[in-house]
Image (tube, rainbow, N blue to C red):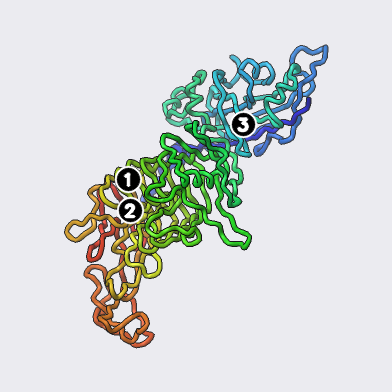
Amino acid sequence: MKKKLIALLLSLTIAAAGLVGGTIAYLTDTDSDVNVMTLGNVEIDQKENGKSENGFENGTDLYPIYLPVDKTDWREANGVVKKTVTVENTGKSDAYVRTWFAFEAGNLTWDEFEEYILLDLNKGEKSPWVWAWDKTRTYEIKNEKGEAGNYYIAVAVLKEKLEKGQTTDPSLIQLAMAPEADSTVMEAFGELYRVLVFSQAMQTMNFEDVGAAKALAIGFADEAVTDDAIGVNHPWEKGFEQNYPVTADTWDGTADTSWYNDTDTEFMIMTAEQLAGFSKLVDEGKTFEGKTVKLGKDIDLYAVDADGERISFNPIGYGYNTVFKGTFDGQDYTIKNLYQNGWALGLDYSTEGGGLFASVVDATIKNLTIDNAEIVMECIDMGTVVGYSYGNCTYENITVKNSVIANYNRYTGGVVGEVNGTQTFKNVDVIDSTVSALWGTYDAACGGIIGGKWGDANITMEDCDVSAKLDVFNDACSNYMYYNYRLCGMLIGMSEEVTDGTATASYLTAKNCTVTYGDWANYTYCEFEANGQGSYNDPDEWKHSRVQEGYATGGVDPNHTHDTDESHEVLLVFDQLFGGDKGVKGGTAHTGVTVVYNNK
């Protein structure tokens, strides 16, 4: 039986810069003294068969070896595959080094694996490496196609420090398939056999030996690593694709629900069609209460129809009553190119939600990045992640980036549109994105994280960063006479709480949060009042009203008038964490929130 070996070499350097020495420069006769200190760095180069990149040669044949009658050691047999793994210290500092190995196990027990997969490891009393295995179980790791496989994991730790410029002896030397392997053994691995390798290094400075380095709690050890340590620290615990980039699964516009059943409590979504099927299932009334849905790889939702028009992804859920109540774990994967057009989807005004999820109740959404989303709707509460969020909900380890979400006359949030109940946001970032109001809207409450609060709410934000743009400038309509941005804030749009004429949020507990304003925060335009005489269609009769105190600069006479086609701009500074309402000033500060002004 002849099979091919694909051994994928994954090399990662964990660099920890440390102070390795210092020299004080000679003092001069000027008033300036210069102190110069040399900084060290940690850099390694993992090599296989002497090669730095992709050293494992894909396509190498692996088949049961033949041991000639005059040989007794399998290492001398025909068919042994040379795989020497070394690590070179290419940095400026001495380093402690370890190399992780994941050997595909198929469905073999440990005893069977040890019998049929022959590994020439550099180990023993005279070896510079100490090896540890977890022989008690296999670990599920995804391959380059996103398919899960079973692997036995080992770690080789260098006993002594690796000096700068030096290269280790090999940790793995060669491997082979035992001559006793039959077709059953071959079938346990499928068409390809995989070996994953991952090297790490850390500084030696300030740590006397490998044992002392253990204090950093990253698994370096001067003795065999325990099974528990391997299980906690191995580099593939979040999936193979984390270290081997693969193309995101793309969407053909259809929905696949075949992955679902009523008995399981955990599901893995591996395709865009399955994600669309998830939406279909929730729309049909399956709340997933008590169940967990995980992403197994990146998903790309870009799709076009036969006419070349973008296909909108239907929100997961419907509105107030058709909701998601489970846990959605993105497992640090990304959903890209989420596109929703409210008119194309035929969503009902004021009854449905927009975003990846339309509505959630008592749900958890975590470990997810949404990249390059585009969501445009009218009169529908919407957020990039969730439209309505009620009950006890948690949002954790979420990033929204490179996205645009725009609405008319409803709550609109960079993460969630409307909230009610206990809402927790931990490590949630909204960056390089825009939350916007449409067409002269007069009450679109736009928020960097939350569009607005409705009713009672208890909100926690911890380690959240917002540097998105709130594009909420709006001509003041003649019959409303106030600026749309008064309803908007970098954390919460409509706060529904006013203290002494200023929007506040005593219901919000914030810790270690940062809001960054860009130069977009200075809006300019003229406000006008018609008094029954002027309109947008009759610029000759525009008469300008006084801009509310504190929101205009520049010494412009607020009672000036315009001739035909004459324009004038009044500077309006946006500086709000929370928005209020007509006649209410925005809240500009809150305990636990650091404000950074990059527009000054």
Q: Residues within 10 Å of mark 3 (few under 14, many from 20)?
A: many
Which one is in front in this view, the residue at disc 3 or the one at disc 2?
2
- Residue 31 in view here: no
Name the quarter where the N terminus is drawn.
top right
Q: Secondary structure at mark 3?
A: strand
Closer to the camera in the image, 425 or 242: 425
Instruction: Measuring from the top left, give residue 596's x and y in whole percent.
Output: 33, 55
Left or right position of 474 against 173 = left
In this rendering, the answer to whether 110 lies above or below 95 is above
Query: What is the CA distance from the residue labelled 3 to the residue labelled 1?
Result: 39 Å
Residue highlighted by disc 1: 461
Q: Residue at x 63, y 60 (%)?
A: 306
Residue type highlighted by circle 1: Met
Residue highlighted by disc 2: 491
Q: Secondary structure at mark 2?
A: loop
Name the quarter where the C terminus is drawn.
bottom left
Residue type highlighted by circle 3: Leu
Q: Earlier in the sequence, mark 1 or mark 2?
A: 1
Closer to the camera in the image, 346 or 120: 346
Left or right position of 448 against 228 = left
Q: Earlier in the sequence, mark 3 or mark 2?
A: 3
Instruction: Measuring from the top left, give residue 88's x and y in whole percent.
Output: 60, 33
State if disc 2 and disc 3 touch (CB < 8 Å): no
Residue type highlighted by circle 2: Leu
Q: Earlier in the sequence, mark 3 or mark 1?
A: 3
Query: What is the CA distance from the residue labelled 3 to the residue labelled 2?
Result: 43 Å
Q: Which mark is residue 196?
A: 3
Query: What is the CA distance from the residue labelled 1 to the residue labelled 2?
Result: 9 Å
Residue 236 figure quarter: top right
- Residue 294 in view here: yes
Instruction: Measuring from the top left, give residue 163's x and y in whole percent.
Output: 55, 30
